[in-house]
């Protein structure tokens, strides 16, 4: 049996990120039958403080044998079932840093607790009925959110905005299955099924599943972010574009071509979506070995990017080298950035537009003057909206596991429709209906296996 499924006993873990000299508070969390006993063994509270649930006590942690003072702490008590795990839970709020929380954790382990597995506190919350699987996954998304919008989507999942429609769809499938099985068991007592009505009911469920599936791309973007590569010839203003966009001086800017020798990275948020921007070395033929490595990395970055910002110099127009680079990157979603627009007149712009008329998506910038950045972000969001990078206008977003289960459910429902149209016996209808019901149950945890739990909770941090 997987370690992640071994949920017996009392568990303990450090529940906060521990960085030397960076945190003022560190928390050690304990959950299980021995939680209160461990707290009373290690913690001494001066005065007449009351030990009861949902109170915070002030005191000290001392080594039970030597009475050596370990730390001055606050103790938070949450007794079952009014706790995160629905078990007895205590938290020692220690001074931040490394030594205090590690010593407190070690004492907890020496007095009956074991070290929690990744995600085991949340796994217990699920197994004890406090959360369903969608809510558990939303907690992980909230902890790892890279933008305010990603956090809002995670909170929506935590509040059940995904679980509710999934449960309703599963209930609808169960109703259809009940009607079919009733005809099998009591064929002589009931009227025949209305095939058209049954197909209509199945199509309605399938349509709602399709709408949920449309949120998968947006969910992936919110969780992992959008990787954008700025690509082009040397000295067209790629580094200036990165600096203007990120409002920093991440990249060195000079008039010398080939200044950028490696990929320079910056993290931004555009329209609520995390964006990893890669400023690449100018692509050209060179004998400089260091620059040659940079050029190869630029090509690799362009091939790995979700979106390419192909940048050209407006004052030099569309050159033969630009055409060669475009041929190397045009298989990726692409926006043409016409930079240094402040250096050209209207006639030059008209000439340039004629040369690039085969490129639908283009914007004008003067990066050195901080001009055109808003247009650039609008173009990126428009690319996402058009589906080139994937999006959906809903207040929830499914993850990869949920997408796979929904696809299985949709396929099963399509097979039911085929079975009905082929006028096969009712027993055949039930096979794929049960498949759809099982797949929908996997999403919320009503149909659960050890492998599913292992896959979900092994991605959590220890202490959550």
Image (cartoon, helix red, strand yellow):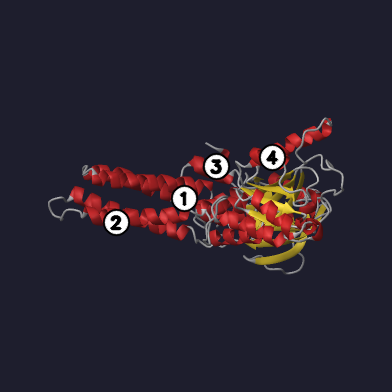
Q: Which numbered disc, 4 or 3, marks the residue that appears first in the sequence?
A: 4
Residue furthest left in the image: 188
Q: Are marks 2 and 1 in contact (CB under 8 Å)?
A: no
Rendered image: mark on residue 455? 3
Report the side of 221 relative to 346 (left or right). left
Q: Can you identify the residue that label 2 sits on?
A: 200
Q: Which percent across, then down, holds residue 233?
A: 76, 42
Compute the Cα span from label 4 to label 2.
52 Å
At x 36% / y 55%, what residue is drawn?
Answer: 205
Between circles 2 and 3, the one closer to the viewer is 2
Compute the Cα span from label 3 to label 1.
13 Å
As drawn, 53 above or below 319: below
Q: Can you identify the residue that label 4 sits on?
A: 325
Compute the Cα span from label 4 to label 3.
41 Å
Q: Which percent across, then down, holds residue 268?
A: 71, 55
Q: Can you identify the residue that label 1 sits on?
A: 443
Q: Could you say whether the residue bearing mark 1 is in a helix, strand or loop?
A: helix
Between circles 4 and 3, the one closer to the viewer is 4
């Amino acid at each position: 049996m997987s370690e992640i499924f071994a949920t017996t006993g009392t568990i303990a873990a450090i529940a906060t990120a521990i960085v030397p000299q960076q945190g003022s508070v560190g928390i050690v969390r304990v959950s299980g039958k021995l939680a209160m006993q461990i707290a009373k063994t290690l913690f001494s509270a001066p005065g007449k403080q009351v030990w009861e649930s949902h109170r915070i006590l002030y005191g000290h942690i001392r080594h039970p044998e030597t009475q050596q003072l370990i730390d001055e702490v606050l103790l938070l008590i949450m007794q079952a079932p009014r706790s995160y795990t629905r078990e007895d839970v205590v938290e020692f709020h220690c001074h931040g840093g490394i030594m205090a929380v590690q010593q407190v954790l070690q004492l907890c382990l020496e007095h009956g607790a074991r070290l929690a597995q990744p995600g085991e506190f949340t796994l217990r919350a699920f197994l004890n009925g406090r959360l369903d699987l969608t809510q558990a996954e939303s907690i992980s998304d909230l902890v790892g959110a890279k933008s305010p919008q990603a956090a809002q989507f995670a909170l929506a999942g935590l509040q059940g905005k995904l679980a509710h429609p999934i449960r309703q769809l599963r209930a609808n499938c169960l109703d259809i299955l009940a009607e079919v099985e009733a005809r099998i068991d009591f064929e002589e007592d009931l009227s025949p099924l209305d095939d058209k009505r049954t197909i209509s009911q199945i199509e309605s469920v399938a349509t709602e599943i399709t709408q949920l599936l449309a949120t998968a791309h947006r969910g992936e973007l919110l969780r992992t972010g959008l990787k954008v590569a700025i690509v082009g010839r040397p000295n067209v203003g790629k580094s200036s574009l990165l600096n203007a966009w990120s409002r920093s001086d991440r990249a060195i800017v000079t008039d010398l071509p080939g200044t950028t020798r490696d990929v320079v990275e910056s993290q931004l948020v555009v329209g609520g979506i995390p964006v990893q921007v890669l400023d690449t070395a100018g692509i050209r033929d060179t004998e400089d070995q260091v620059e040659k490595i940079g050029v190869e990395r630029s090509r690799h970055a362009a091939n790995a990017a979700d979106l390419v910002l192909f940048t050209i110099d407006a004052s030099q127009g569309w050159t033969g080298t630009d055409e060669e680079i475009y041929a190397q990157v045009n298989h990726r979603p692409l926006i043409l950035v016409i930079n240094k627009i402040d250096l050209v007149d209207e006639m030059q712009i008209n000439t340039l537009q004629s040369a690039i008329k085969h490129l639908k998506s283009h914007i004008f910038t003067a990066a050195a003057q901080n001009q055109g950045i808003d247009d650039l972000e609008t173009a990126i969001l428009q690319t996402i909206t058009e589906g080139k990078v994937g999006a959906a206008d809903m207040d929830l977003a499914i993850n990869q596991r949920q997408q796979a289960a929904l696809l299985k459910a949709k396929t099963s429902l399509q097979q039911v429709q085929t079975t009905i149209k082929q006028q096969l016996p009712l027993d055949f209808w039930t096979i794929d209906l049960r498949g759809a019901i099982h797949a929908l149950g996997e999403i919320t945890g009503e149909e659960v296996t050890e492998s599913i739990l292992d896959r979900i909770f092994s991605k959590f941090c220890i202490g959550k």
